[in-house]
């Protein structure tokens, strides 16, 4: 009986240990926001709603911490690209308003704690690596706080498996 109990306890520890490993993501990141390193702990990508017919969209989310808390940090953006693009979603996407159907463009925000900045100017380079893996390269993107027009710069890259 003791051997059977020991077997179930050890199996439970094994299963618990394995499940926590599978929940973590392997993320390679060197993102700098306002001179401070931002290392996301969760990466997500989903199909977005295209703005016009003949386009496709992807929504990216890179987060750290719990929403609403002071340690929360999130970089979220949508890319829009024409369905006729043979290399999509790979490409360089300008933040701001683009000419739909002819240009790759993105819209997004960066949140730190309770402050949200709108991304504007300068691009993000998106490379699909296959099997839900992407590399995102942020090229000195300006992030503007709409309440006081203060600005920060976001640069660097993030590579990993997006869920």
Image: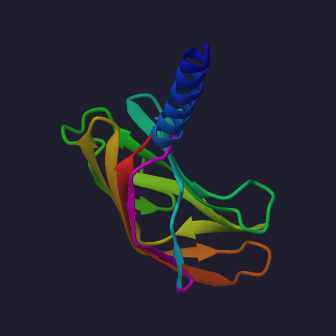
**Image x and y of residue 127, in percent:** 27, 51
Nearer-the-camera pick, 146 or 36: 36
The image position of residue 66, as x and y in percent, is 73, 54
Decide whether residue 28 is among the magenta residues.
Answer: yes
Residue drawn at x 43%, y 43% is 162
- Reply above or below: 154 against 136: below
* Residue in the foreground of this view, choosing between 132 and 82: 132
- Say which quarter of the image contains residue 73: bottom right
Residue 158 drawn at (x, y percent): 39, 61
Task: Please name the residue shown 34% across and 37% down the image.
Answer: 132
32 is higher (above) or lower (below) than 135: below
Give the residue at the far left of this rendering: 86
Question: Which range of residues does the magenta coloring cover?
Answer: 23-35
Does any portion of residue 50 appear in the rendered image? Answer: no
Quarter residue 152 falls in: bottom right
The tally of labels here is 0
Q: Is 138 covered by the magenta stretch? A: no
Residue at horizontal 47%, vertical 35%?
Answer: 18
The color scheme shown is rainbow
Left or right of 135 in this view: 112: right
Q: Quadrant of residue 124?
A: bottom left
The reply to whether residue 68 is in sight is: yes
Closer-to-camera residue (108/110):
110
Q: State left or right for residue 126 relative to residue 19.
A: left
Residue extending furthest toward the front:
2
Work out whether 40 lies above or below 140. above
Nearer to me, 66 or 80: 66
Image quadrant where one finds the N terminus: top right
């Amino acid at each position: 009986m003791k051997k059977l109990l020991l077997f179930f306890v050890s199996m439970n520890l094994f299963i618990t240990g394995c499940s926590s490993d599978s929940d973590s993501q392997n993320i390679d990141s060197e993102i700098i926001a306002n001179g401070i390193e931002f290392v996301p702990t969760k990466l997500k990508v989903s199909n977005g709603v295209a703005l016009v017919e003949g386009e496709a969209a992807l929504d990216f989310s890179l987060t750290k911490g719990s929403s609403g808390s002071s340690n929360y940090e999130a970089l979220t953006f949508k890319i829009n690209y024409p369905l006729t693009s043979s290399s999509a979603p790979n490409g360089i996407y300008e933040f701001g308003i683009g000419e739909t159907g002819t240009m790759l463009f993105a819209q997004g925000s960066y949140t730190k704690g309770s402050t949200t900045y709108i991304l504007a100017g300068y691009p993000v380079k998106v490379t699909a690596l296959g099997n839900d893996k992407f590399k995102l390269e942020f090229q000195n993107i300006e992030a503007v706080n709409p309440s006081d027009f203060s600005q920060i710069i976001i640069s660097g890259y993030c590579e990993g498996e997006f869920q």
